[in-house]
Every structure is written in C-alpha cells, then in structure tokens.
Image (cartoon, rainbow, N blue to C red):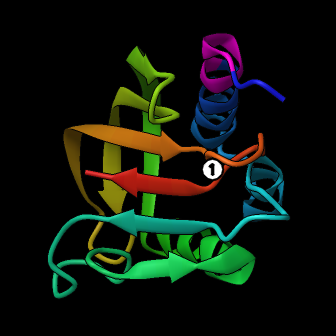
Amino acid sequence: MTITRDNLLHAAKSLCIDFASKKDPDALMTHFSTTHQCSAYEHGLPILAPFLGRRFVGHDGIRDYFKTIASTLSFERMEFSEYIVDTEVQKVSVKGRARFTWLSSEQSWDEIFTYRRCIPCQQWSAGHELALI
C-alpha cells in the first residue's frame, strides 16, 4: 500500500486526539503497529522524570510509557497544531501545548512540546515510533 500524506496525517492526528482526550493506554495502543517493532522515547534527563531519557520498546513498553505518564502527570487544555508531514521519510512532526501537573507535588506548568511519529517504510501500519523532543 502506498503511504500518502493524508494517511500519515490521519494516523498522527488520530493519536493526538485520543491522547489529548485522555484515553486509557489500551485505547492508545490501537494506534501502534502489531506487526512492526514500536518504541517511544521522550528526550530529557531520567533523573527528572521516570519516562524521560529511556526507550520504551514493543507493545508492552509503549503501554508502560503511557501508564508511567498517567501515574506521574495530569494535563489539561492539551492541543496540537502545525502538523508537518514528510512523505519521503514517512514522519509526521507536530507542535503540542498543555498545562501539566506533577501529581506528587501538585506543581503545574505550561509547556510547548514537539512530537514526531515515524511509520515503517516497508508496509503501512498505524504506528512505529513515537518521539517527544
């Protein structure tokens, strides 16, 4: 199947909508391939948060990534904009913003972040790699 710009954009937007809607990790997993190796990586120092600076690999790893975020942070007013689709390398980058709260301290902050979604080159799937930069 040929991967089009619309395919890539739809896959990225669908995940962003479900994540911003606070869907549970199992619902978010439907956006990731069952036939290709998936991974998630959020850049940052591991000392700052348990989901930063480590790669979560495979379906169990991706699920753990989303569960770790949910057990550490809450968020409100999450929105995504400025989707950039690169069909040659099959990646979508998007700008996100939200108000996050660290659950244990109840400290809150506004954050702007980017998210990149990579799709395998060999065959269309609903997801492959999630990277938060």
What type is the residue that disc 1 sits on? Pro
Residue at the extreme bottom: 47
Q: Is residue 102 magenta?
A: no
Residue sitting nearer the eye, 70 or 27: 27
Q: Picture coordinates of residue 32 (x, y %)? A: 73, 54
- Above or below: residue 8 compared with residue 32: above
11 with respect to 39 (left or right): right
Q: Picture coordinates of residue 88 (x, y %)? A: 46, 27
Q: Picture coordinates of residue 64 (x, y %)? A: 61, 79
Q: Picture coordinates of residue 45 (x, y %)? A: 15, 78
Q: Main secondary structure of the magenta part?
A: helix
Q: Identify the image quadrant of residue 52.
A: bottom left
Residue sitting nearer the eye, 1 or 24: 1
Which residue is drawn at the image coordinates 34% and 52% (left, top)? 132
Residue sitting nearer the eye, 13 or 78: 13
Specify start and end residues of the magenta stretch as a single range. 4-9
Residue at image mark 1:
120
84 with respect to 91 (left or right): left
Which residue is drawn at the image coordinates 49% and 54% (left, top)? 130
Which residue is drawn at the image coordinates 44% and 28% (left, top)? 77
Q: Identify the image quadrant of residue 26.
A: bottom right
- Above or below: residue 51 compared with residue 132: below
Which residue is drawn at the image coordinates 77% and 40% (left, top)? 124
